[in-house]
Image (tube, rainbow, N blue to C red):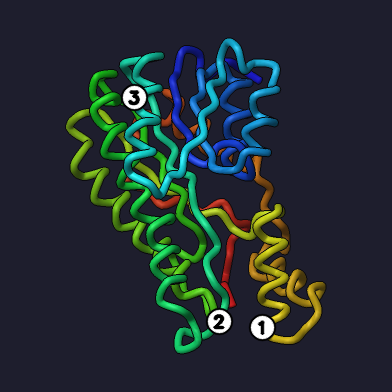
Amino acid sequence: MLKTLNNKKIVISAGASGIGWATAKVCLAKGATVFICDIEKKYLTRAKKHPLNNKKLFVYECDAANEDAVTELFKHISKKTKKLDCLINNVGIAGPTGTIENLKSEDWEKTLKVNVISHFYFTKLAIPMIKRNKGGSIINLSSGAGIMGFPLRSPYAASKWAIVGVTKTLAMELGKFKIRVNAICPGTIKGDRMVRVVRDKSKFLKVSKKQIEKEFISMASMNCWIYEEDIGLTCSFLISDEAARISGQVIGVDGNAIRLD
């Protein structure tokens, strides 16, 4: 890959698995220095074995939904660098599946805590470091569920719509500092999380997993899965100088999603 991110310093929350890990690998391949955190020890162990770990990749354990843990994480990062080029707010959970009257309050609260409030923790601490850099980028991971309804996934949809609102607002607040803020809305990602979502929806509706998978694929007019690296490549473009005038945008990487149901 072309080294379009040479000397860029990037923080990725939940960066040791899924979209976060795919994005980290793309950014590393393009020359960036990447700081990732995660809560899952097995994924952290895998990341630490990455060939570029000693030079360009820094790996930390952190519960992104715990403000004290995030504060401690940034203390570690600030010992390595005083400036950042980009923050990627990637952390998120699928949340519960069910009609709203059957969902538990604690499941709603947990979904919003992880998917929205964690972004606040990271963003608040990253902004001064990006300002010190005289500009940069914040990328928030929303979802197709952040721009349309998503039956049986109301807390997830609520959290992802919130991310779009935060993105638009931050782009307005931070533009004068040459900090660009964009949201990416992935479509149906082929990966471990989708396996769990398919399982839960299959169980709730009492239909086969294959039927649920077929329905998810058909939600896009291109009739396709989206792959984690697709999101990584989009992130790497938005971080690069080639995207210097792109801000306040909500970008679907979804094969043209036409419904979420």
Residue 11 percent coordinates (x, y): 44, 30
Q: Which tag, 2 or 1, sits closer to the chain's start?
A: 2
- For the point 45% across and 54% down, the residue is 142
Q: CA distance from mark 3 to mark 1?
A: 43 Å
Q: Amino acid at mark 1?
A: Phe
Identify the image quadrant of the N terminus.
top right
Between marks 2 and 3 in the image, the one whose residue lies nearer the viewer: 3
State the residue position of label 2. 98
State the residue position of label 3. 75
Please, what secondary structure does the residue beneath circle 3 have?
helix
Residue 257 percent coordinates (x, y): 58, 64
State the residue position of label 1. 204
- For the point 57% across and 15% down, the residue is 3
Q: Marks 2 and 1: CB-CB under 8 Å?
A: yes
Q: Amino acid at mark 2?
A: Gly
Q: Amino acid at mark 3?
A: Lys
What is the quadrant of residue 198 in the picture? bottom right
Residue 99 percent coordinates (x, y): 51, 85
Q: CA distance from mark 2 to mark 1?
A: 7 Å
Q: Marks 3 and 1: CB-CB under 8 Å?
A: no
Which one is in front, 60 or 201? 60
Q: Is residue 251 left or right of residue 2?
A: left
Q: CA distance from mark 2 to mark 3?
A: 40 Å
Asked if residue 232 is positioned above or below residue 201 in the image, the reply reads: above
Q: Which tag, 2 or 3, sits closer to the chain's start?
A: 3
Asked if residue 22 is positioned above or below residue 78 in the image, the reply reads: below
Q: Is residue 127 left or right of residue 190?
A: left
What is the quadrant of residue 147 in the picture? bottom left
Asked if residue 188 is positioned above or below residue 69 in the image, the reply reads: below
